[in-house]
Amino acid sequence: MQAGGSSGAAVIDMENMDDTSGSSFEDMGEMHQRMKEEEEEEAEAAVGDEEDGEFLGMKGFRGQLGRQVADQMWQAGKRQASKAFSLYANIDILRPYFDVEPIQVRNRLLESMIPVKMINFPQKIAGELYGPLMLVFTLVAILLHGMKTSDTIIREGTLMGTAIGTCFGYWLGVSSFIYFLAYLCNAQITMVQMLSLLGYGLFGHCVTLFITYNIHFHSLFYVFWLGIGGLSTLRMVAVLVSRTVGHTQRLILCGTLSALHMLFLLYLHFAYHKVVEGILDTLEGPNVPPFQRVARDIPVVSSAVLNTTVKVMALTS
């Protein structure tokens, strides 16, 4: 029984083992096939990732380089902007050009009408802008007064804007042009000195226009134009002559400045000036028509009254 039982159990066990071993072999084959397929898929994915990595790596490098260049440009522009803002926003830089006493401005205004005689050595020019700036604003006010009295009509813009543009345009524009011409002629003068010299030269213009805008005589204007305007122009010419070497250079520089300065005064007078006809009528006399005889109506007097009057005159005689 035991032997039979053991043999039977052995048979059963072998059958079970055969069945189990067969299924395990099949599973191992499937697992091997799956592992092989997974390895192939991983290999293909790795190849694709390498290609994508190479493409993205080049693209990423270019993007990173572009970002670095843009950042450097931004930082450089930011530094320049901050430097420029701090330069123009700092009041201390402009303080030396406006640190002047009122008595000094008064003396320089008087000196601007007195031509210098010594031209053998460079004449001193005040390097301040307070006096010239105030003279330009004064000229703006006088020109605005002349525009209003002459009934000037501005189609585009305002009277104030036109006056400011005319005066500051002349001051800055002519100063820049003469400074450039002085540089070509080897004159020893700076831009600030040129602005100061031309600004104080406008004192004669202010005096001339202030008087002739209120007293409307062309002959008086020409006297002031040659007298006061000529003196201020001669002062600037003498200073430039003392700082320029060479007769030709002196002639070009001083002739240009004299022509521009004197013609500007003529322009301001005739462009914004109106002759009052009432003053001319007062001087020449009113236009009264000649005396003419006028017919008058005599009232009708009765004959009785006339006869009585004649009799009375006869008796008295």
Image (cartoon, rainbow, N blue to C red):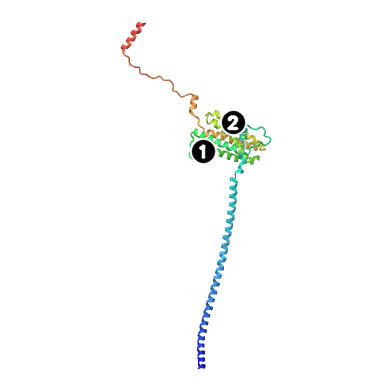
2 vs 1, front mark: 1
Residue matched to label 2: 228
20, above or below 130, in the image: below
Q: At numbered mark 2, what does the secondary structure look like: helix, strand or loop?
A: helix
* Residue 225, quarter of picture: top right
Q: Amino acid at mark 2?
A: Ile
Residue that appears at 61% across and 41% down:
95
Residue 90: image x %, image y %?
60, 45
Q: Position of residue 6 (x, y in %)?
A: 52, 91
Depth check: give the residue in front, 153 or 71: 71
Occupied quadrant, residue 121: top right
Outermost right residue: 120
Q: Is residue 180 visible?
A: no
Q: Residue at x 51, y 89 (%)?
A: 9
Q: Are marks 2 and 1 in contact (CB under 8 Å)?
A: no
Alpha-carbon neighbours of circle 1 within 10 Å: few (<14), some, or many (≥20)? some
Q: Residues within 10 Å of mark 2 (few under 14, many from 20)?
A: many
- Image quarter where the C terminus lies is top left
Q: Residue at x 59, y 38 (%)?
A: 130
Residue 2 image label: none
Which callout, 2 or 1, points at the residue further toward the start of the chain? 1
Element under disc 1: helix
Left or right side of 68 for 317:
left
Tell me how far mark 2 sits from mark 1, CA to CA: 26 Å
The residue identified by callout 1 is 160
